Image (spheres, rainbow, N blue to C red):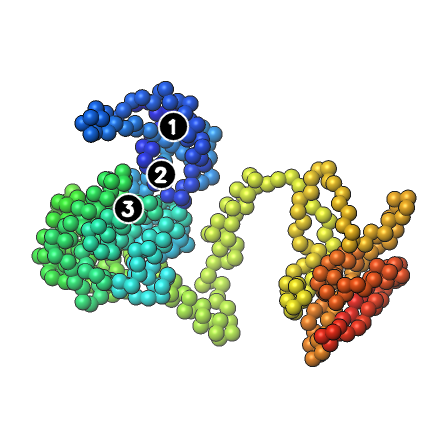
Amino acid sequence: MNSASISSIEFRTFSNLPSRRTAYLTHRRVAETLHQSASSLPERVGSSSSKAGRKSFIRYTVSASYGDKESGSVNSNEFTSPAKALRKLLESPGVHQGPACFDALSAKLVERAGFDFCFTTGFGISAARLGLPDAGLISYGEMVAQGLEITQAVSIPVIGDGDNGYGNAMNVKRTVKGYIRAGFGGIILEDQVSPKACGHTRGRKVVSREEAIMRIKAAVDARKESGSDIVIVARTDARQAVSFEEAIWRARALADAGADVLFIDALASKEEMKAFCDVYPLVPKLANMLEGGGKTPIFTPIELEELGYKLVAYPLSLIGVSIGAMQDALSAIKGGRIPSPGSMPSFEELKEILGFNTYYEEEKRYATTSSQLPSRKGDFSSNSNEYGVQPGIQADRVQRTQIPENPVEVLIPEVYDRFSGEGKKGNFSMAWSRKLRVKITGKDGFEKLDIRIPAGFLEGITNIVPALVGVNIKSLLDEATLEEGGKQLLDFQDTMGDRIQVILE
């Protein structure tokens, strides 16, 4: 098949690329490539007479480069979808561990630790995003939005917690399509009623067998309609809601409906876990190692592999230790201390984890050659915004705009320049080398303003203190700039009763 030198991915998939792998291959570049190679793209995947009501379509393929691996060639890097990466993992030998993340940072930490994939956890996201229990309170919109931030932050595939699909079969289809667009490699769908809750809490209820099966069929249809191969993980909570026998029946039926991975939550013994893994042995099984006292016994990865599991989820580890660490830190701060050095990364380590160093390196690619105005000592400082000055802004460290190689001199009327007729500078340079201190004291005795600005910048002082408009400060400067030491130029009360002092330093 001809591919116009933009090989390997169906064009429909390109529209679904997650933004975490933002393609350097722009829409314009794709369009130009297709236009230039239009004559080489006649091959049709399927075609027939339009009279028969059937459509013909052309299969275009593209590839792009992502992150910091931009290539000058259009077809140098092939994009592996999260779903494809996850399926490859499922086909590889051994058992695979996936800690559950709840935000972008926790996902990055999972990837940095060397894991090949991770989960999102409704329990953790509900806690981190809402500060609420996992009791059906969080919505589809909130879950998919959080999921998008997570998938953007990492390059490993992420299996998203799709809860019960947030409604009937039609809602399930929308949920699956939304998770595909958000960049998930897989989605977990369960058979709980609404509102749903954590499978290891009390009062679990499940929908009918028929509705549970229809949810998975709807998910499969949504996958086909999206042109995706997202991995569908079918979960049943029937073990605690009904019986172990019912959970096994549903696992078989959900696999028949098209599920790629099976998951019975809250199994109560090793024997039950083994019996579950014996159901359709070629269909991968997911084990949920709920930390801290769930209903399922905890086993090592090797033991779980011997039972027949392929994937292992650890849903509470990251959110749990995060809560504990924050509680310890808050206790230390409240006691007048800071957290001990061993309890948290150093600032340099934090910057490395968050990507500051990578950012600085990439920033160099876009650096421009420019010159800046020389900085001067002194600063603005203010305890009040009443006169239009933001507290703490340093006047002489404010970044200037870049000036061109051949700058054009612009004379501002309100700048005190006092050039001599022969073009030699008079007191101008000396005025800029000294500071005007403007101090305003309220009638209640409290200081309202205390700033320093270059003595030559007269427009600035009148903008800051309107009461100085009309005062001939230029003449005062003419007499004072050559004097050694400081001199008080003005000391008066304005109409509001505030004392205004202007001192040349």
Read off the residue under disc 3. Answer: 177
- For label 2, count other residues whose C-alpha is less than 10 Å away and answer few (under 14), some (14-19) or many (20+): few
Q: Residue furthest right?
A: 422
Residue at 22%, 66% (x, y): give it: 201
Count all numbered tags in the image, as a single digit. Answer: 3
Residue 6 circle label: 1
Reply above or below: 288 against 310.
below
SS category of the residue bearing label 3 = helix
Please report whichever mark, 1 or 3, sits nearer to the chain's N-terminal start. Answer: 1
Residue 177: image location, x then y, percent: 28, 46
Identity of the amino acid at label 3?
Lys
* x, y percent for residue 160: 29, 51
**Which one is in front in this view, the residue at disc 1 or the one at disc 3?**
3
Give the mark nearer the N terminus: 2 vs 3.
2
- Residue nearer the viewer, 76 or 328: 76
Residue 373 image position (x, y, % from top left): 72, 47
Query: Mark number for residue 15?
Result: 2
How far apart are the two marked residues, 1 and 3, measured between alpha carbons? 26 Å
Front-lying residue, 451 or 39: 39
The first of marks 2 and 1 along the sequence is 1
Amino acid residing under circle 1: Ile
Could you tell whether 252 is left or right of 12 in the image?
A: left
